[in-house]
Structure formats: structure tokens, C-alpha cells
Image (tube, rainbow, N blue to C red):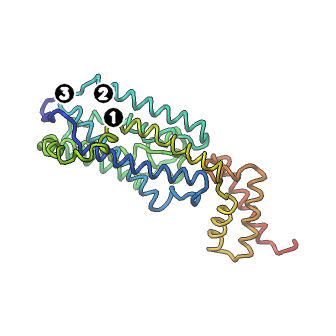
Amino acid sequence: MSDSVKPPSRGRIEIVDLARAVAIAAMTIYHFTWDLEHFSYVQEGLTAQGGWRIFARCIASSFLFLVGFSLVLAHGKRIRWRKYAIRLGQIVAGALAVTIATLFATPNSFVFFGILHHIALASLVGLAFLRLPAWLTALAGILVVAAPSFVSLPGFDSRWLAWLGWFSETMPLSNDLVPIFPFFGAVLIGIAAGRIAVDRDFVAVMRGWNDRLKRLSPLAFAGRHALIIYLLHQPLLFGLVALFSLVAPADRDAIFRGDCTKACLATQDAAFCERYCGCAERRLKEESLFDMLMENDAGPGEMTRIREITTSCSFDAARPAGE
């Protein structure tokens, strides 16, 4: 490989560690909110829509940008294979641990290609872009980000292909799906930014900020150990909320009726909605689908049955009283 890339000076760059720590803090906030939703303390579906959905995508993109940027800092002149292999092995092991844990905890929505899976693959594929001109890598990143907006492909709604990209209107259920398209684009843009920082000696400028950032060293320490924090924070948060739910469980019946009635009143009158929501709640409980729905862990088969039940209840609710 060419040695035309200027090697960065040795030593850590505090601002990069701080950025990684901020991303971890944001992810912790998101996951805690997801846990509250899972145990029905907040509105069902909250973290999958609106600002929370954008927040989640920004968090994933920031992590992946830093992966690309750090790949250049660590291997800008030459790939240090031993260090690279150890780090990659740690990430792969972490990804497998997440898959196994979620397969037991939420089998219908387990993580088959989440952020760690993406980082592992991106760390491999990203090596091919380390020697390309920064502008070309950045352009490739933009195209990867944009592709799902212009390309629609059949068959990408299965777990076998969904990890490649958001190319289908319906994606398989997963608690953390971070496909190659569009998210690998953030890695490529990070690699391009890293190349520019190294080539133009911005790395030395960033390292010059280290002394002024010493007061934030505890936060930087968290950034240096982002992987272990990522692996531990969600089991701890999930466990704490689970324990709290044993002491003060959420009223799932009230939450379901409130959400159902709110959605129903957008198109129907109060009497219809009362009959419809009562029917749906009763029949979902009879078929042991209620908790699965409220925990957002219903698989494709269960979701099909849930839709059948709600459709049937809508017909029943529309019938005149006494029929």
C-alpha cells in the first residue's frame, strides 16, 4: 500500500474520545426510553416514530462516522494488523453476544444486524477506501446514504437480505437494525474526514486541544471504553426497569385503551371506538397477543393475526346494537 498519507502523531485525541462519549450518552438516553416503552411506562411505539426515530438514526450515524474517522487515525499510514485483529475480534464477539441475548429476551425482534454487526463489517470494507482520494470516498458515502431513497427491490423484507439496505417498504422486526445502505455512508464520510484531517495536519491541531480538555477527562475515559459501556449499559438499564415493573407495574390496559381510542377517534365516533377498542383488547388477551403487542415483540405471524383481529373488531363495532 502507498505511504503517501501523512501519519498522524502518536497519542490519543481527546476531542474524538469526547465525541464518542457523547454518542454513548445519547444512546443510553434512547435505550432507557426504549426500556420504558417495552414495559409500557410510555406510549407504545414512541421510540420508533417522530423525533425519537430521527434521534436514533443520528446516534447510529455519529458512531459510524467516528468508526471511519478513527480507522484513518489508527491505520492511516499502514494497517497495524495485530491491533486491528484484536479490536475486530472484540467487536465481533460483542455483536454475537447482543444477538444471543436478544434472541432469548425478545425472540421475535432479536438483533440480527445491529450497530456492532455494522461496525464489524464496516471495519473490514472500510480498509478498501483508506487509500482513495477523500473527495471520492465522500462521494461514495453520499451515494450510499441516498440509495434507499431511489432504489426499491423486492425480497429485502427478509432477515436474509434486510441487513444490506432499506430497499423495501416493510422491514423485518428488530430492536436494532442498522443496514449497510444507508448507514455505511456515514463510515465513508468519516473516512473522508479522517483523510482530510491527516493530510492537512488538522490532527495535530486537534491534539493541541488536549490540555484544555483535561477537565473533561472522565467523559473522555468513557469514550475510550465505549465498547464495554455499550455492552453493559442496556442489560443494566433493562434489568432496573424490569425490577421496577415488579414493584409498580404499568397499567397496560389503560395505555392500550388510551392509544386505541385516540387513533380511533380520528375517523370514528366515541361509541364506535368504545366498542372497537374493547373488542380488540378482549380478543388479543384471549389469544395471548396483548402483551406481545405492547412489548413490540410480535413476529410476522402474530402481526398478521393481530391485524385480522382488529379488522374483525372494526366490523363488529360497526354493527347496530342488538345484532
| Side (left or right) of 44 relative to 123 | right
CB contact under 8 Å: marks 3 and 2: no
Image location of residue 109, percent across then percent down:
57, 44
User: Which residue is under mark 3?
Assistant: 1
Judge the density around disc 2: few (<14), some (14-19), many (≥20) Cα neighbours within 10 Å: some
Residue 202 location, x and y as percent? 14, 45
Quickly name the residue at label 2. 84
The mark that comes first in sequence, 1 or 3, is 3
Residue type marked 1 = Ser
Q: What residue lies at 39% left-to-right and 27% top-to-bottom?
A: 89
| Mark 3 neighbour density, 10 Å: few (under 14) some (14–19) many (20 or more) | few
Answer with mark 2 or mark 1, whichever residue precedes in sequence: 2
Depth order, front residue of 234/171: 234
Residue position marked by numbered label 1 in the rendering? 123
Query: Helix, strand, or loop for circle 3?
Result: loop
Seen from the viewer's position, the closer of residues 98 and 214 is: 214
Q: Earlier in the sequence, mark 3 or mark 2?
A: 3
The image quarter containing residue 81 is: top left
Label 1 CA crowd tier, 10 Å (few <14, some 14–19, many 20+) = many
Is 295 on the left-hand or right-hand side of 63?
A: right
| Alpha carbons under labels 1 and 3: distance apart | 17 Å
Q: CA distance from mark 3 to mark 2?
A: 16 Å
